[in-house]
Image (cartoon, rainbow, N blue to C red):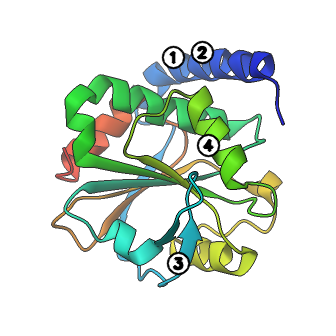
Amino acid sequence: MLSARFLRRLLVASLVLISVAGPVQAAGKNYQRSIVKYTMPDVVLVNQNGTKVRFRRLIETDKTVVVDFIYGTCTTICPVLSAGFANLQRKLGADSRKIHLISISIDPEHDTPQVMNEYLKNFRARPGWDFLSGSREDIDRVMKAFDAYFPTKMSHRPLDFIKAPSSSVWVRLDGLMGTGDLMSEMKKAGAL
């Protein structure tokens, strides 16, 4: 288990990276946007509370869905992505209830509900942000469905996926971005 002191340092470093990345992203140089149609597998995953959830049912909702791929012991891009989700929830305030944030573990062998719950607490996640894990086979199926398969957790890269409630397509965002850029992309997608 990571110490609270280490996680606080990691959060501060992540927030610094996000604030530095903001101007670069505003210039459109730090991420790529594409519109893609995906077919999701009907797998059962487990959330940070230990509750089993059907992934397809979770994303077929009347809320905007934003998905990323992370793991609980990551010290590189995952804290940056998670700080972005935390900032998004704070900036949206009460409107954050209209959005379902979903982080999917790429390290299901180690990301137990306890690890995922602690991870979300460290980012002060609000209701509406779920961290999901499951069997290696099911996680691989979800990653492949999003064309985001990473053979090892060390080879992952920053990806966000946005789906508006009335849409059958996803906005795929490859690369790091600030919260302002994520909100802008959500608006473009009709998700805000």
Labels 1 and 2 touching (C-beta < 8 A): yes
Report the residue marked by disc 3: 145
Q: Residues within 10 Å of mark 3 (few under 14, many from 20)?
A: some
Q: Is residue 5 above or below residue 165?
A: above
Tag 4 secondary structure:
helix
Q: Amino acid at mark 1?
A: Ser
**Which badge, 1 or 3, is on the more N-terminal residue?**
1
**Which badge, 1 or 4, is on the more N-terminal residue?**
1
Report the residue marked by disc 4: 117
Q: Is residue 144 above or below residue 24?
A: below
Residue pictured at 82% horizontal, 31% vertical:
2
Residue pictured at 75% horizontal, 21% vertical:
4
Instruction: Please identify, in this view, whether the residue under mark 1 or under mark 4 is nearer the observer.
Output: 4
Report the residue marked by disc 2: 16
Depth check: give the residue in front, 188 or 68.
68
Q: In the picture, which quadrant includes the C terminus?
A: top left
Labels 3 and 2 touching (C-beta < 8 A): no
Depth check: give the residue in front, 162 or 129.
129
Q: In the picture, which quadrant includes the N terminus?
A: top right
Q: CA distance from mark 1 to mark 2?
A: 5 Å
Report the residue marked by disc 1: 19
Tag 1 secondary structure:
helix
Tag 3 secondary structure:
helix
